[in-house]
Image (spheres, rainbow, N blue to C red):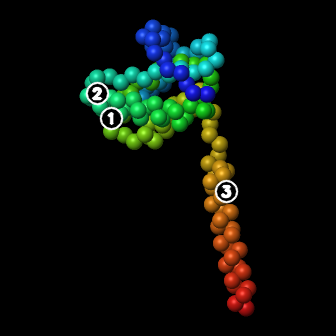
Amino acid sequence: MKTAKLCRNSDFRRVYKRGRSLVGRFVVIYYLKNSLGYNRMGITVSKKLGSAPVRNRIKRLVSESWRLSEDGLKKGYDFVIVARSACTDVKMMRVKDCLCDLLMNQGLMAKPANPENNEHEGAKHAGTETVSAAREGAEHEDM
């Protein structure tokens, strides 16, 4: 389910005041349990980080990172993500990795499945076996 936006100032203040925080290199995440059964998320970027285009880019990076990782999140929380100054010149995947690490360490996100057992890797190994079988067949033909 898509995460709803946290819009009202009073909601942001409630999460800041009563919530817990997780500090990472690129972001600080404040979170608080809600009674809604679904997650809400808000992003804040200080004017100290740059002009409006820079701040908008940071918001897009953070929101896309969140979108890619929201499937594994526990439901029923309000999140406020505060961008830090290191976030101004970084790639989106680094922000996503930071978000996921913070949330997994706190137990708010399920750990991903073993990357060695995913479908892409299985297809890669299956292709390798096919090539090996073809080589063996060629060797038998030479004899």
Q: What residue did someone put label 3 on? A: 122
Q: What residue did someone put label 2 on? A: 52
Q: Considering depth in this image, is 116 or 122 the residue closer to the camera?
A: 122
Identify the image quadrant of the C terminus: bottom right
Residue at 66% in and 62% down: 125
Q: If you read the primary sequence from the N terminus, does the residue marked by circle 1 or circle 2 appear first?
A: 2
User: How packed is label 1: few (under 14 Cα within 10 Å), some, or many (20 or more)?
Assistant: some
* Side (left or right) of 132 relative to 86: right
- State whether residue 107 appears in this view: no
Q: Tell me the kind of residue under disc 3.
A: Gly
Q: Residue furthest bottom?
A: 143
- State whether residue 55 appears in this view: yes
Q: Tell me the kind of residue under disc 1.
A: Thr
Q: Distance between the residues labelled 1 and 2?
A: 12 Å
- For residue 88, the mark is 1
Residue 76 in percent (x, y) is at 61, 19
